Amino acid sequence: MADTPAFTPLTGGCQCGAVRYAITAEPLTAATCHCRDCQYASGGGPAHALLVAPDALLLLQGWAHEHAYQGDSGNTVVRSFCPDCGTPLFGRTEGAAYVIVKAGSLDDPSVFRPRMGLWTDSAPPWHHLDATVPSYGRNAPG
């Protein structure tokens, strides 16, 4: 039986360096979300994110400011960002068994490979949808 290579932790942080984090376990999945809330948070396009188990996200330095609101699901959504430079970093939804880490905050964002597109019905007509990635008009089933 072949050995599975050990997961190499991923690291990241904000643009100014005030917040640093590590992802210590393999992400649950990777998604590109086109919901209207993600468009606001990204400045127009979708959000690219890794979904990780809550205990796999380790804050190494600083703290992230949180903004909470009611999402389309009716659940409380929390978006976290650097209080100094505003870099979007994390997110979570009430009742979800994962936390979101924004792919753009990774030290090496090239490791991000989307495995699904979410809320694609909300994508603006000028945004290209990758036909090679499974897409869900709203949220992924299950």
Image (cartoon, rainbow, N blue to C red):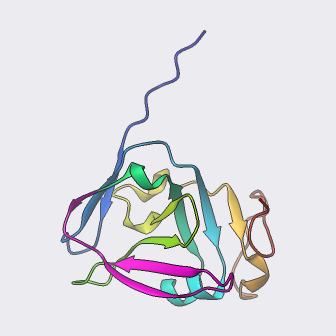
Residue at 61%, 85% in the rendered image: 71
Q: Position of residue 50 (x, y in %)?
A: 52, 59
Residue ranking furthest to the top:
1
Residue at 38% across, 77% down:
80
Question: Residue 119: within the magenta?
Answer: no
Residue displayed at 74% across by 85% down: 122
Asked if 80 appears above or below 134 in the picture, the reply is: below
**Residue 10 percent across, percent down from the top left:** 37, 48
Q: Quadrant of the N terminus?
A: top right
Residue 120: give x, y in percent of width and height: 75, 76
Question: How many discs mark residues in the rendered view?
Answer: 0
Please report the bounds of the magenta region as a residue range. Answer: 59-81
From the viewer's side, name the closer residue of 65 and 45. 65
Location of residue 55 with respect to 82 vertically, above or below: above
Say which of 126 and 4 sits in front. Answer: 4
Provide the major secondary structure of the magenta segment: strand
Task: Confirm whether the magenta stretch covers residue 65.
Answer: yes
Q: Is residue 119 left or right of residue 30?
A: right
Q: Measured along the vertical axis of the image, is residue 88 above or below residue 58?
A: below
Which residue does the image show at 50% across and 70% down from the upper left? 92
Q: Quadrant of the C terminus?
A: bottom right
- Please state the horizontal and vertical placement of residue 115, each as a whole percent of the image: 67, 54
Does residue 110 appear left or right of residue 73 in this picture?
left
Name the image quarter holding residue 7: top left
